[in-house]
Image (spheres, helix red, strand yellow):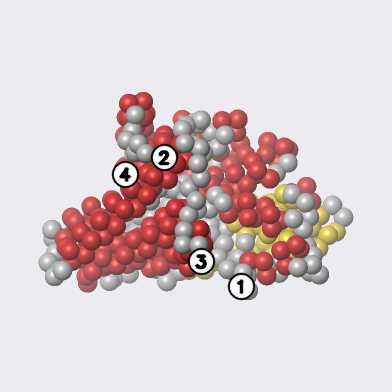
Amino acid sequence: MDLSFSETDKVFRDQVRDFLDLKLDDELRAGARLATSVFTHPDIAMRWQSILHTQGWAAPSWPVEWGGTGWSVVQKYIFSTECQVVGAPGLIPMSLNMCGPMLMGCASEEQKKYYLPRILSGEDFWCQGYSEPGAGSDLASLKLRADSDGEDYVLNGTKIWTSMAHYANKMFLLVRTDFDSKPQAGITFLLLDMNSSGIEVQPIVSISGDHELNQVFFTDVRVPKSQRVGEENAGWTVAKYLLMFERGGSSAPRVKRTIEELRKVLKKTDVPGLQSKVDEAEIGVMAIEATELRVMATLSNGGSPGPESSMLKTQATEMQQRLTELTLEAWAYAALPDQKSARTLGSNVKPLAEHGAMLAMPHYLNTRAASIYGGSNQVQRNIIAKQVLGL
């Protein structure tokens, strides 16, 4: 298995580096550095998406016919890696990485032609309506009603943990259209306008003080049946297809940058035993990177990543959590003050300590969820046990 880049790939890498050097201005870099979770502030993320869209690089994994790049697996890996190395802003994943691929695989031609260009351009900003107060890991138990009324469905109920719903103008969601069949058989997949009458978005502020999550309430919200994806009561199949795109991606460059930043902090502090802990973490990152390269090589040859994707999800998220713990240990008391006002986009409040210390605690708190979302690490270990160990 050859894990080295070809000369053609090296030329492409240089082109990507030149583009990033030219287009990533100070505002975009600063906005990206303020991100304390998987979400960059939407103003920064959407501005960066607009620049990438103009270049034709907003959706590297999409087919060319819908605005994709036509890049090889290696080129996509190079682009993702270089963006992380220089600290480019992350894009909002629900639109480009989840809703778009779902529409391509499951929607009608009319829906594709209308929505996909609007996703690329950023005209539509999507959020995901899956979880409910009583339906998280057991998503099939969802109860948000969608009663048929002529050409519409009428929605009543609630969704929770709805990321970025306070910015989104669109939502893709699962609703209950049949209460008598087995749970999975009575679910329908809908697309709706967040400006519809009867929708109320209530904020959920995290322990870090960030507002990314929401609870959304639906009271007699009318959704045209033309906005259904797939057949009525067949939404579970669409949902499973979409979840294939929620996971994955390269994480090694991001965690390598964290280690580099940690080493800079170590030069300013004197925490006994911390150096050896960082060295140990770096070895783990090298193993993650090697596995990512193996998966890329497999995909380049037309293969499937198999259980390696579960291995990567587990190891990468736990490594992210480990590094945030080490970062807190390195900054010590400097990381304790709550400086939400100083780390808000556009704020002119001066931080009490260095930038890294200001972000250390919110990074730590937000990363606690990384081993849960996108398929909990316990679920990933079950997959590994079955596919690798035959248990």
Q: What residue type is labelled 1?
A: Pro
Mark sitting earlier along the chain (3/4): 4
Q: How crowded is mark 3: few (under 14 residues within 10 Å), some or many (20 or more)?
A: few
| Residue 39 visible (yes or no) | no
Residue receiving disc 3: 391
Q: What residue type is labelled 4?
A: Val
Q: Please identify, in this view, whether the residue under mark 1 or under mark 3 is nearer the observer.
A: 3
Q: Please identify, in this view, whether the residue under mark 2 or under mark 1 is nearer the observer.
A: 2
88, 101: nearer the viewer? 101
- Which residue is painted at 34% across and 38% down in the image? 3
Q: How crowded is mark 1: few (under 14 residues within 10 Å), some or many (20 or more)?
A: few
Mark sitting earlier along the chain (1/3): 1
Corner quadrant of residue 359: bottom left
**Which residue of the protein is positioned furthest toward the bottom in this rendering?**
134
Label 2: state its secondary structure.
helix
Instruction: Indicate the position of residue 188 as horizontal and vertical percent values.
Output: 73, 57
Q: What separation in Å lies between label 3 and label 4 (alpha carbons)?
A: 38 Å
Residue receiving disc 2: 297
Q: Do the residues labelled 3 and 4 touch (CB within 8 Å)?
A: no
Residue receiving disc 4: 85
- Which residue is painted at 47% across and 58% down in the image? 388
